[in-house]
Image: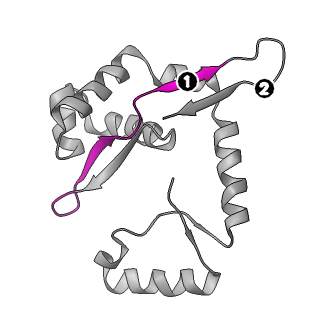
């Protein structure tokens, strides 16, 4: 996951620039941290918080079919993917957000304000610790 390190003042300056010119935000990560150490801690918490049960549910048969559509058809927008998958755009957007948070998909900027979903991972591994609390999730 990409992020930017900067002070609160730098973040405020950047925000003002984006208000003046929204295109200046393109290519800038959405997550900002005050230090690399804070970014590492946040990353560990995010991975640790990813419960295996939630990931298994997210990777339902219907959502795996969606991932195949993204990989094979490379839709140019969420709207196009909604048409291809015969799913409502609002429902699809929620699913895509969860898949993005899990590191499975990302978005590529398209024409105007469109975002094209792209597959980032080809494998998800769940390591269940059946007697302790050391289960792990890895996405690659």
**Residue pictured at 17% horizontal, 64% vertical:** 112
* 81 within the magenta span: no
- Answer few, some or many: residues within 10 Å of disc 1's Cα (few below 14, many 20 plus, some between 14 and 19): few
**Residue pictured at 33% horizontal, 50% vertical:** 107
Residue in front for this viewpoint, 54 or 69:
69
* 120 within the magenta span: yes
Task: State the colouring used for the structure image.
Answer: one colour
Question: On the image, numbered disc 1 is attached to which residue?
Answer: 125
> Is disc 2 placed on a helix, strand or loop?
loop
x%, y% of residue 1? 51, 52
Mark 1 or mark 2: whose residue is earlier in sequence: 1
**Residue placed farthest to the top in the image?**
130
x%, y% of residue 93? 35, 41
- Answer few, some or many: residues within 10 Å of disc 2's Cα (few below 14, many 20 plus, some between 14 and 19): few
- Determine the image quadrant of residue 51: top right
What stretch of residues is rendered in magenta?
110-127
Question: On the image, numbered disc 2 is attached to which residue?
Answer: 134
């Amino acid at each position: 996951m990409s992020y930017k390190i900067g002070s609160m003042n730098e973040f405020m300056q950047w925000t003002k620039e984006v208000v003046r010119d929204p295109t200046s935000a393109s290519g800038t990560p959405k997550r900002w941290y005050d230090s690399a150490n804070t970014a590492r801690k946040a990353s560990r918490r995010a991975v640790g918080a990813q419960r295996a049960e939630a990931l298994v549910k997210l990777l339902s048969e219907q959502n795996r079919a969606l991932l195949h559509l993204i990989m094979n058809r490379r839709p140019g927008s969420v709207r196009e993917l909604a048409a291809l998958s015969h799913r409502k755009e609002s429902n699809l957007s929620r699913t895509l957000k969860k898949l993005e948070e899990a590191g499975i998909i990302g978005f590529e900027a398209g024409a105007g304000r469109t975002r094209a979903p792209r597959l980032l991972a080809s494998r998800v591994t769940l390591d269940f610790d059946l007697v302790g609390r050391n289960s792990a999730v890895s996405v690659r």
